[in-house]
Amino acid sequence: MTRITVAKGDGIGPEIMDATLAIILSAGAKLEIDEIEVGEKVYLAGNTSGIASESWETIRRNKIFLKAPITTPQGGGYKSLNVTTRKFLGLYSNVRPCMSLHPFVSTKHPIMDIVIVRENEEDLYAGIEHQQTDEVVQCLKLISRPGCEKIVRYAFEYAKQQNRKKVTCFTKDNIMKQTDGLFHQVFDEIAKEYPDIKNEHWIIDIGAAKMADTPEIFDVIVMPNLYGDVLSDVAAQITGSVGLAGSANIGEECAMFEAIHGSAPRISGQNVANPSGLLQGAIMMLNHIGQTEIAEKVQNAWLKTLEDGNHTYDIFKEGASKQKLGTKEFAKAVILNLGQKPSNLKPVSYSNNSALNLPKYKRKPAAKKVLVGVDVFVHWNGSNPDELAQKVKKIESMEIKLSMITNRGIKVWPDGFQETFCTDHWRCRFKPNDGIEVSKEDIITLLQKAIDENIDSIKTENLYSFDGKAGYSLGQGQ
Ligand code: NAD
C-alpha cells in the first residue's frame, strides 16, 4: 500500500481525476489517498502561491503527488504552482514519453516513440531578471554542474532501465559556450559510463527541426529547461494530440505526476474531456512506486480501448472511430478491458520500471580560481563608442586597463563598425596591466573612480580563470 497525495485541480481536473482513479483502483492499485485543495479556489482566497502550508506538509510526508491541471488566474501576481512545486521539492527531472498510436490517432508520424528528459529546475527558469538601463533588461541563465550531472545521468539510467538504445543531447553550445557548453561537456563525460547506449549531440535548432520532421530517428532526448519546455510540447503534439501525454517530475525525495495539458475551462463540467493524459501520468506513478503489474495492466487496457475505436471527442474521427464516449464512459470502457491486451498496437511489458536509484551528487574538488579582470556594465546614452572609451579610460589605473567595449555582446571598441546598432547598455572589459591577476581592491578603486567621473556603472561581473581556463566568453568579433 502506498500513501499518495491527490489534487483534483480546476476546470476538467476533477472529472479526469475521478476517471483516472476509477481506472487504476479497479485495476488493483494499492493506494491510500490524501486529497488536498490547490489552484483557483486557493489563489482567489488570497493565497498567491495557490497552495496552503498544510497541503505542503501532506505532499512532503507522502512524497508521491498525483496532480490534475490547475488554472492560474491571469494578472494579480499569482505564481505558477507547477514551477513552485518543481523547485521546492527539487523535482529536477521532467520525463515525457511521446508515442504515436497510429492508425488509431491521426498523426503525420506513424513511427514515433520519443522520451523527452527535460532539466526542470534551472536555466532561464531561475526567473532572475533585472532592468538595468532605459533600454535593456536581462534574464540570468544559470546552469550548474550538479544540475547537468543529475539530469544527464537520469537520462542514461532511464534509457538503460527501459532498454532504449540511444540518448541524444540538444544544446546551443556553439553560441552559449559556457552555459550550454557545460551541459554538453557533462553529457560527453557521463555518456562514456554507458558504452552500451549510443549517444549523440545536436545543435538544438537543427535537432528540433529534425525531431519535428523525422522523429523516428530519436529515442531519448535530454536537454536544458527552456528547450525541453518547448520541444516536449512539440513532440507530444506531433504524436497527434497533446491531450494524450502524461509527465513525471522526479526528484531525489519526491515525485509529481500529471497530464501535460491544462485545465481546459471551456469544456469543464460537460463529461467530455479525455482523461488519457492524466491516466498516462498515473501509470508512470504506478511504475515509480513499484506497482509495475498494475501499470502494465492499465496501459494495455487503455491501448485496447483506443484501438477498438472507443474515443473521446478530441480524437474522435468519423469512419475511423467506433464510438464517441464521454469521460466517465471512456473510463468504464478501459475498466472493462482490464486484463486484455491490444492486438494491433504493441502491448507493453514492464519488467522493472521502479524509481531509479541514482547516486547523490558528489562535489568536485575546487579548482584554482584566479581573478583575471572585470566587466563593468555602464548606462550611457551616447552613440559613439570611441567617445565612451575616452571617458572610461579616465578610470584606468596602473593595475587595470580598458581592453574592450561591447554592446549587446558585439565588440564596438577598439575597431568597431559604425554600422553596429548600439543601445544604452555597454560592457567595458578591464584586464590587468601585467596580464596576470587583479585584486578585488583594484575593482573597488575602479568603481570609486567611475563615481568620481560620473560614469553610471550598473553592475560588474568578475572574470575568473579556473585551473587556467577562462571562465568567461570573449566579445563577439573579438
Ligand atoms: P489547455 O491545455 O487547458 O487547453 C488547450 C486546448 O486543448 C483546449 O482547446 C482544450 O479544450 C483542449 N484540451 C486540453 N485538455 C483536454 C482533454 N483532456 N480533453 C480534451 N480536450 C482537451 O490550455 P489553455 O487553454 O492554454 O490553459 C487553460 C488553463 O490551464 C490556464 O489557466 C493555464 O494556466 C492552465 N494550465 C495548467 C497546466 C497544469 O496545471 N499543469 C498546464 C497548462 C496550462
Image: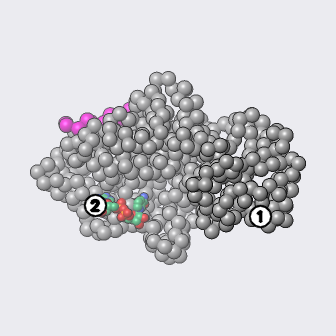
Q: Is residue 27 above or below residue 196?
A: below
Quarter for ligand 1? bottom left
- Residue 273: mark: 2
Q: Is residue 16 visible?
A: yes
Picture coordinates of residue 324, whole percent (x, y): 17, 57
Out of 97 and 279, give the one closest to the viewer.
Answer: 97
Tell me which residue sits at (45%, 71%) in the image. 73
Q: Residues within 10 Å of mark 2 (few under 14, many from 20)?
A: many
The reply to whether the magenta stretch includes residue 86 is no
Tell me which residue sits at (66%, 36%) in the image. 362
Tell me which residue sits at (57%, 54%) in the image. 419
For ligand 1, tell me if the residue under mark 2 lies within 8 Å: yes
Kindly state the secondary structure of the residue where label 1 is placed.
loop
Q: Is residue 282 visible?
A: no
Picture coordinates of residue 98, whole percent (x, y): 35, 44
Return the residue at label 1. 455
Q: Which residues are magenta?
A: 343-355
What secondary structure do most residues of the magenta stretch adopt?
loop
Q: Earlier in the sequence, mark 1 or mark 2?
A: 2
Q: Amino acid at mark 1?
A: Ile
Tell me which residue sits at (53%, 66%) in the image. 79
